[in-house]
Image (spheres, grey):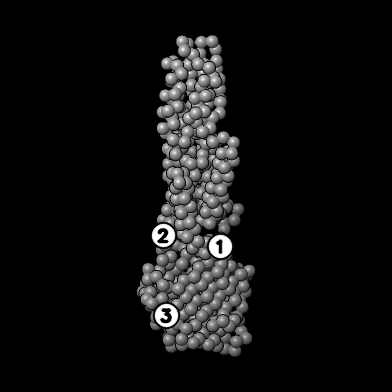
C-alpha cells in the first residue's frame, strides 16, 4: 500500500471521528435530553445553590439552571419532586426581558407571560393533584397555544395571541424548600432568537398569596398577579422618526454561543481543513506546490469559523467586518481555477461550522471528497502523468525525436508529447511523463545524456512522486 492510500485511509478515519462528534450537535438543533448524569452540567448555566448527584439535580432557593437556545414550537417535559412545601418554576422561551413561566406548587399550578413591561397570568388552577413523589410536567407550545399536562394528563389548553419569540429553558426554585429534577426532554424547532442577557436578574416569583389570583368559583376570569389589572405592553417604536428601529438594528445581540460549542467547532474546522488538504494534495492537478498551498486551508477555515461565530448574531459586528475587509486587501495570486475552487470550499466549510451547521458541513465534505475522487478516477483513465519533462539538444551531436522517445519508453510508465520544436541545428521537446520510482528519474536522465553530450534535461514537478 503506497503513501497515497495511507493518507486517504487516514482521511476516512477522521471523517468517522467527525461523524461521532457531529452527531450530538444535530440533536441540539432540534432539542435535547438531559438526565443530569454529569456533575458539571455541561451546556447549562448555573446560579445559586445547585447540586448534581446520582443523576439528580437539586436546586435550593434561590437557585436556577439555564439552557440557552432559540427554540420556538416546543414539546417540553420536566420530571421533578418536592415534599409538602416548596415549588418548582419551569421557564421556556427564555430571552432578554421575556419568558413564559409555569409554576407548580402542591395542589396548584399557574402559567404567566413575563416581559420587561408586564407580567400577565394566562391561566391558573387550584385543584391539581401533585404527588409527593416524582411528577412530570409537560408543556406543548405551537401556533400561540400552550397545552399544559401533569403526569401525562392534560390539565389545560391556553391560547396566547401575543406569543413570545423562541428562547431557552430555565429551571429555578425562588423560595421555600429545595426541589429535585431528574430529567428534562425538549423537542423543538429553532426559531427567532431573543438573547438572554448575561446580567439578567433572576425572576422574582413566588407562590400566590391567599386569595390572590384564584377565582373562588372557577367561572371568573383569572386575576392578574398582585390583584391590579395589567394592560398589554404598548409598542415601543417611535413612530415616523424610526429611531427605535434604528436602535434595534444596531443593538448588540449576544450570540449565546457556549465556550464548549465554540471550541468544538474550531477543532472540527481544523479537522475538516486537514482532510480537505489531504484531498487536494493527492488528487489535485495544480502545477504549483500543493502541499504549501494546502497548509493554508486549516488557518483559513478556523479563522472563518471564528469570525462567523462572533458576528452571526450582531448586525453591527457584521457591518464592522465588512468595513475591516474593505481596508485589508487580499492580494494572493491564484494561479489556477482549481486553487480558487478549494479556497471557496474551505471558506464555505468554515461558514457552515460558524453557523453550527455541523451535519451540513460533514455532508458537504463527504460529497466534495467523492466528487474529487471521481474526477481523479476519470483523469487516470486518460493519462495519469506527474512530471513535465523537457529535452533539448543541438549540434554537434543533435538527436532526433525517435531516439528521445525510445529512451523515455524504456523508463516511463506513461508518456505524452506536448511540444516539438526542431531545426537543422537543434531540437526542443516537451513531454508529460509518469515515473513510478525516484530511481527512474536519474536513470532516464543518464540514458538521455548518453545519446549526445549536448542533451539538456529539465524536470518540472506537477504533483510529485509517491
**Who is closer to the viewer here, 45 or 25?**
25
- Specify the quadrant that holds the C terminus: top left
Residue labelled with disc 3: 179
The correct choice, above or below, for 269 with respect to 411 in the image is: below
SS for callout 3: strand
SS for callout 2: helix
Q: Residues within 10 Å of mark 2 (few under 14, many from 20)?
A: few
The correct choice, above or below, for 262 with respect to 456 in the image is: below
Residue 437, image quadrant: top left
Residue at 41%, 66% in the rendered image: 42
Q: Position of residue 365 (x, y in %)?
A: 53, 50
SS for callout 1: strand
Viewer-side label of 1, 2: 2
The correct choice, above or below, for 463 with respect to 187 in the image is: above
Residue 455, image quadrant: top left
Residue labelled with disc 2: 260
Mark 2–mark 3 Cα distance, whole angstroms, equals 28 Å
Q: Position of residue 167 (x, y in %)?
A: 52, 65
Residue at 54%, 20% in the rendered image: 402
Whether pointer 1 and pointer 2 mark residues with C-beta atoms closer than 8 Å, the reply is no
Amino acid at each position: 500500500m503506497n503513501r497515497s492510500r495511507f493518507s486517504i485511509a487516514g482521511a476516512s478515519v477522521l471523517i468517522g471521528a467527525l461523524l461521532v462528534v457531529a452527531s450530538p450537535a444535530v440533536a441540539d438543533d432540534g432539542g435535547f435530553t438531559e438526565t443530569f448524569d454529569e456533575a458539571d452540567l455541561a451546556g447549562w448555566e448555573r446560579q445559586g445553590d445547585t447540586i448534581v448527584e446520582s443523576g439528580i439535580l437539586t436546586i435550593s432557593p434561590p437557585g436556577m439552571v439555564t439552557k440557552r437556545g432559540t427554540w420556538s414550537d416546543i414539546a417540553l417535559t420536566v420530571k421533578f419532586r418536592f415534599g409538602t412545601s416548596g415549588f418548582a418554576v419551569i421557564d421556556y422561551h427564555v430571552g432578554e426581558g421575556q419568558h413564559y413561566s409555569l409554576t407548580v406548587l402542591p395542589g396548584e399550578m399557574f402559567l404567566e407571560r413575563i416581559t420587561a413591561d408586564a407580567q400577565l397570568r394566562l391561566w391558573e388552577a387550584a385543584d391539581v393533584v401533585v404527588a409527593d413523589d416524582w411528577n412530570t410536567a409537560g408543556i406543548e407550545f405551537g401556533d400561540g397555544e400552550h397545552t399544559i399536562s401533569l403526569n401525562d394528563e392534560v390539565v389545560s389548553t391556553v391560547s396566547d395571541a401575543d406569543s413570545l419569540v423562541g428562547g431557552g429553558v430555565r429551571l429555578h426554585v425562588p423560595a421555600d424548600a429545595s426541589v429535585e429534577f431528574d430529567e428534562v426532554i425538549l423537542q423543538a424547532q429553532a426559531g427567532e432568537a431573543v438573547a438572554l442577557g448575561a446580567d439578567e436578574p433572576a425572576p422574582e416569583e413566588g407562590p400566590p398569596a391567599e386569595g390572590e389570583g384564584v377565582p373562588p368559583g372557577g367561572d371568573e376570569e383569572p386575576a392578574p398577579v398582585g390583584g391590579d389589572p395589567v394592560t398589554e405592553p404598548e409598542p415601543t417604536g417611535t413612530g415616523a422618526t424610526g429611531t427605535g428601529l434604528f436602535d434595534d438594528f444596531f443593538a448588540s445581540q449576544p450570540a449565546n454561543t457556549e465556550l464548549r460549542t465554540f471550541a468544538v467547532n474550531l477543532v472540527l474546522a481544523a479537522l475538516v481543513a486537514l482532510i480537505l488538504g489531504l484531498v487536494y494534495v493527492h488528487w489535485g492537478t495544480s502545477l504549483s506546490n500543493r502541499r504549501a498551498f494546502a497548509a493554508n486551508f486549516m488557518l483559513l477555515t478556523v479563522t472563518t469559523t471564528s469570525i462567523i461565530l462572533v458576528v452571526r448574531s450582531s448586525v453591527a459586528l457584521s457591518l464592522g467586518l465588512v468595513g475591516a475587509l474593505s481596508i485589508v486587501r487580499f492580494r494572493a495570486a491564484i494561479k489556477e481555477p482549481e486553487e480558487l475552487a478549494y479556497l471557496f470550499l474551505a471558506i464555505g466549510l468554515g461558514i457552515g461550522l460558524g453557523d453550527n451547521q455541523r451535519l451540513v458541513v460533514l455532508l458537504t465534505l463527504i460529497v466534495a471528497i467523492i466528487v474529487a475522487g471521481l474526477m481523479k478516477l476519470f483523469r487516470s483513465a486518460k493519462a495519469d502523468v506527474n512530471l513535465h519533462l523537457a529535452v533539448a539538444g543541438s549540434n554537434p551531436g543533435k538527436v532526433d525525436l525517435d531516439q528521445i522517445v525510445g529512451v523515455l519508453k524504456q523508463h516511463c510508465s506513461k508518456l505524452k508529447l506536448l511540444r516539438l520544436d526542431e531545426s537543422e541545428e537543434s531540437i526542443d521537446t516537451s513531454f508529460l511523463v509518469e515515473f513510478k520510482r525516484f530511481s527512474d528519474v536519474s536513470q532516464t536522465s543518464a540514458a538521455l545524456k548518453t545519446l549526445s553530450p549536448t542533451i539538456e534535461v529539465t524536470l518540472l514537478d506537477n504533483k510529485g512522486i509517491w
